[in-house]
Amino acid sequence: MLTVHQNHQNLKHEQQQQQQQNNNHEKNTSQNSHNNNNNQLKERLASKYLNELNENENDASLHILYADNIDNIELKMVHYLKAISLFHPNGDSAINNKYVECLITLESYDLAYEYIIGSKEIQYTNDILIEIGNYKFDNDEYEDALKMYSEINESEEEENNDIDIYLNIAYCYQQLNES
């Protein structure tokens, strides 16, 4: 009788182990399915993001192309600004330089200055920085002029007379020290 009881216990134990293995398998299968679904969702979201990014770059390129080929400065400026907003605002120095050049052409030096100050990551051309710096200098805004002059890339070859810029910088410091 003890053997029958032991056999019954062993059979019961084997059934429990089999049930536990089945449960573990179902759990792993469910977990794998859940992980696969998460991975597929992540892949779809990444693909959608890349497609939107490509569409934004294409739209921005169209705005740049259009702006480069029109004469109306105000309209040109609007299209450059749209292109900048489609790209990361601090992402492309060339477009930002073109936009600021439009502002300068319209003699909106104060707007150009504010735009440059607000976008520190962009490298502006020396011509732009000097022109805005000179405007600020001519209007006795010496601190703002110094900010523009300090951004000038000294390694860049320029046709401008460097001595005039250095004299302006020295005069700015002199005026700021006297006030």
Image: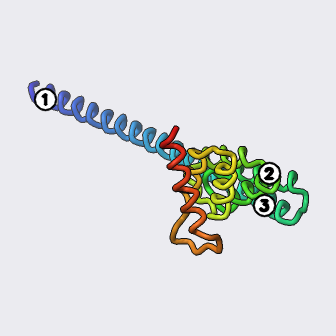
Q: Quadrant of the N terminus?
A: top left
Most foreground residue, 1 or 76: 76
Q: Earlier in the sequence, mark 3 or mark 2?
A: 3
The type of colouring in the image is rainbow
The answer to whether marks 1 and 2 mark residues whose Cβ atoms lie closer than 8 Å is no
Q: Residues within 10 Å of mark 2 (few under 14, many from 20)?
A: few
According to the picture, the residue beneath numbered tag 3 turns out to be 64
Q: Determine whether, in the image, residue 179 is placed left or right of residue 71.
A: left
Q: Amino acid at mark 2?
A: Glu
The answer to whether marks 3 and 2 mark residues whose Cβ atoms lie closer than 8 Å is no
Most foreground residue, 88 or 123: 123
Q: Hey, which quadrant is residue 15 in on the image? A: top left
Q: Earlier in the sequence, mark 1 or mark 2?
A: 1
The answer to whether marks 3 and 1 mark residues whose Cβ atoms lie closer than 8 Å is no
Q: Determine whether, in the image, residue 130 is placed left or right of residue 65.
A: left
116 is higher (above) or lower (below) than 128: above
